[in-house]
Image (cartoon, rainbow, N blue to C red):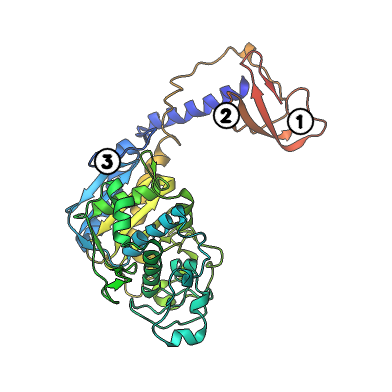
Amino acid sequence: MRTAMCLAFVMAAAAGSAQAAGATPPAGPAEPAWPSPDWPAAAPAEVGLDAALLHQARDYALEGDGSGIILRHGRAVLRWGDPRALYDLKSSTKGIGVTALGLAMADGKVRSLDQPARTFHPTFGVPPEGNAATGWPERITLLHLATQTAGFAKPGGYTELLFQPGTKWSYSDGGPNWLAECLTLAYKKDVADLLFERVFEPIGIRRSDLVWRRNSYRPHEIDGLPRREFGSGISANVEAMSRIGYLYLRGGRWRDRQLLPREFVEMVRVVPEFVRGLPVLAPEQYGQASNHYGLLWWNNADGTLPDVPRDAYWTWGLYDSLTVVMPSLDLVIARAGKSLKRAAGGEHYGVLRPFLGAICRAATATAAAGPPCPPSPVIKQMAWAPPETIVRAARGSDNWPLTWGDDDALYGAYGDGRGFDPPVPQKLSMGLVRITGGPADFRGE
């Protein structure tokens, strides 16, 4: 059929131009790879990445020493430093700790993120006693705590409320620490044990890979249970960080087990509507954070980093510990060590540009040189039909994007025409069609 042959021609032409240019086409496996027990390795070119640009990113990261790993399609394409060295992740703990919120949603411990924190924690928000006088603690929800809009001051201890919940964005350790207490009380269980049993151990993280310290800012126990922090407190190696990132990349699924709700993972990586555009306290430190912050994970939803996909999101702590997830590029990046080099007076995200930008360009540079997608494992070659056999059953209609459905039919759209014979009465700016049959007896409807 004419439309199918046109599609085949486009695919063949793209492949031919790549071969003529001597490019290595990006290759992606049909199924994601998994560690067993270590990550399988691949050369950058094997997964469509430019090695020189990856090395540029690594060299920038090594200005702060430390360790790192870059995964594509579940394959380790670059490592540096000691993969088993433990690093104090500081605020990257926030993005790891909030994983317990996903479990609580799956288990029905949390019915809605709009539930007030007081539902779980009778003394929530107090001390200090001055917070009670505002009337605000009763109005703070779990969503406020997870989006840095609850209003607690920065330190991780018992801090004052700075504003009415949901009216501003302010980076805080205290707010996430209250969230950790709410989840501890909801489960009546140490959240560290909860996460090891339900998430960390199933994805291959041992207690020697990730250590959660005792609370440094509040009493060590709450209702006889360890009182963990979400604001900081986890030390881990980049191996553990990469596994957490890969779990999120795969939508909360690990092999054949759905460990986290996919809906929760989607919530983590986007900016809630009510947060977008809120005034930011200390914008000289945090920039336009309310436009690129999800549920205790940073993101690039507003395109602040122009070389980085807008669907990218990451945990980020002091000393620039990073677990980065890029769904559209099928990438996970983990890095920890000392602080990266900052320009004096630079913007908040500026320190990330040389690192993440080079990695993303490593993917797009190779993609630009080769065909737009990996070679098909099904369509091995093509052959032209004799011109006299070509049938035009939709004259005057153009622009034929096509896709195959699981019902063995082709689905397409045509522009500025009246479609297949018999044509529709009026010319359409865009029409939709289902095509069945074979080259000799196809029909559109």
Amino acid at circle 2: Gly
Alpha-carbon span between mark 3 and mark 2: 33 Å
Looking at the picture, tell me which residue is in the foreground, 256 or 52.
256
Q: Which residue is mark 1?
A: 418
- What's under tag 3, amino acid-wise? Pro
Please name the residue that numbered disc 2 is placed on: 405
Q: Decide: is 349 above or below 368.
A: below
Other-residue count near label 1 (Cα within 10 Å), few / some / many at <14 / 14–19 / ≥20: many
- Which of the 4 image quarters holds residue 320? bottom left
Q: Which residue is rendered at x = 41% and y = 77% of the image?
A: 284
Q: Is residue 311 visible?
A: no
Q: Earlier in the sequence, mark 3 or mark 1?
A: 3
Q: CA distance from mark 2 to mark 1?
A: 23 Å
Image quadrant where one finds the N terminus: top right
The residue positioned 61% from the left and 15% from the top of the image is 439
Q: Quadrant of residue 429?
A: top right
Name the residue beneath numbered marker 3: 35
Determine whether 205 is above or below 411 in the image: below
Expressed as whole percent of the image width and height from the top left, the position of residue 85 reads 17, 56
